[in-house]
Image (cartoon, grey):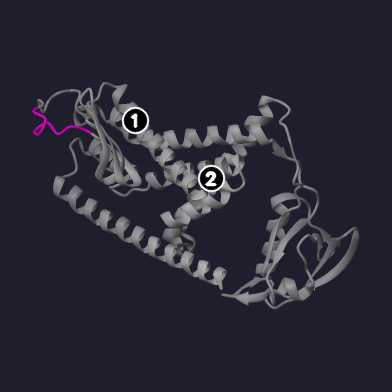
Amino acid sequence: MNVLTSITVLGFLIFFHEMGHFLAAILQGIYVDGFSIGFGPSIIQKKFKGITYSFRAFPLGGFVSFPDEEINNIDPKDPNLLKNRPISQRVIVISAGVIANLLLAYTILIVNVTSIGIPYEPDPGILVLATQPEKAAFKAGLKAGDKILKLEGNILGIGDQAVSTLVSKIQNSSEKEISIEIERENSYQNLILIPQSIDGKGTIGAQLQPNIKKETKKTENINELFLYTNKQFSSLLMKTIQGYKGLITNFSSTAQQLSGPVKIVEIGAQLSEQGGTGILLFAALISINLAVLNSLPLPLLDGGQLVFTLIEGLRGKPVPVKIQIAVTQSSFFLLVGLSILLIIRDTSQLLIVQRLFNQ
């Protein structure tokens, strides 16, 4: 049931993205002849007022199609053809899917904050969520539930800044002693950490987070609601952008963290076990990811089409068809190849985990 829920959420987000393109075209009077969710052969297809609506075999995307004047016997100079519209109107149609996903993600976060509230301000220190056996934190005596209050005799402070301070110190102290003070069950202890070196950076094998209470509180007014939502939305968006940026600047490391369709569905299934809040969080995360992914300058994606359109605006004429076809085909094989590799990797990892669990 959880897997079905995550697939349904994915389908809805794709539908919303394509609906953005569709409405942006229709409301401007631009001809549209197809609206499809998925790729491949049609499973369900219905034609209404000259537009073919379809649901296809592989629901991992979708598209809005525009009529070909030769096939549809339309005057090539008809002003309602997308290619004959001003650059500004075409940019609106191309960008509408990304904008729709961002607006949807923001709306979902608003609903989530309204329903469950916001966290209290973090208490001083850093909370240890878990430690890995035989790693530096475990050897030093750190345990899940401990609160790290001081670093080298200095108070760490609160929130993400406290975590960043400690992580930075750990990374720059490979094989060197670090003194910390912790609180455990209302008593205080001093421990010595000796970070282990991995690729020249120190690591202690612990999961850390700001010392935040599990309870939440209702927002006091609409201003606080939007301030918190803005902060949450901006954080998710920037982290997503940084993740895709890492594919260029640090591909070997980032590629290991890249998730394919199988992994995304698995994550969605896990989050949906938390109920409505988990489903909403999953929907917001994936909606933001769809927006950023489609903004990439690859011809098969909205970002690539936007680049071609802007170049046309600068040149005063379209990019030569041969160049568009060559670049699009290269992009197609790149995206399909990456998708297949991710599906194979994530499926094999999932099967391995299941075997280990059943032993």
Q: Nearer the viewer, residue 37 or 238?
A: 37
| Residue 129, x across and y down, in percent | 72, 60
The kind of secondary structure element at disc 1 is helix
Dot 1, how many residues are within 10 Å of its Cα: few (below 14), some (14-19), or many (20+)? some
Q: Where is mark 1, residue-wise?
A: 92
Q: Is residue 33 visible?
A: yes
Give the residue type at disc 2: Phe
The amino acid beneath tag 1 is: Ile
Residue 10 belongs to the span the image colors magenta: no
Identify the image quadrant of residue 32: top left
The secondary structure that dominates the magenta segment is: loop
Instruction: Estimate the x, y position of residue 6 in percent, counting from the top left.
Output: 48, 46
**Mark-to-mark CA distance, 1 and 2:** 27 Å
Q: Residue at x 43, y 39 (%)?
A: 13
* In the image: residue 139, left or right of residue 27: right
Q: Nearer the viewer, residue 297 or 255?
A: 255
**Do the CB atoms of the residues marked 1 and 2 lie less than 8 Å apart?**
no
For label 2, the residue is: 282
The range drawn in magenta is 66-73
Determine the residue positioned at 61% across, 43% down: 275
For residue 61, what is the image quadrant? top left
Q: Nearer the viewer, mark 1 or mark 2?
A: 2
* Neighbour tally class for label 2: few under 14, some 14-19, many 20 plus, Cα within 10 Å: many
Q: Compared to 68, does 195 lie above or below?
A: below
Q: Residue at (15%, 45%) from the top-left corner? A: 321
- Relative placement, left or right, of 124 versus 290 is right
Give me the residue at 65% from left, 72% from top: 202
Dot 2: what SS? helix
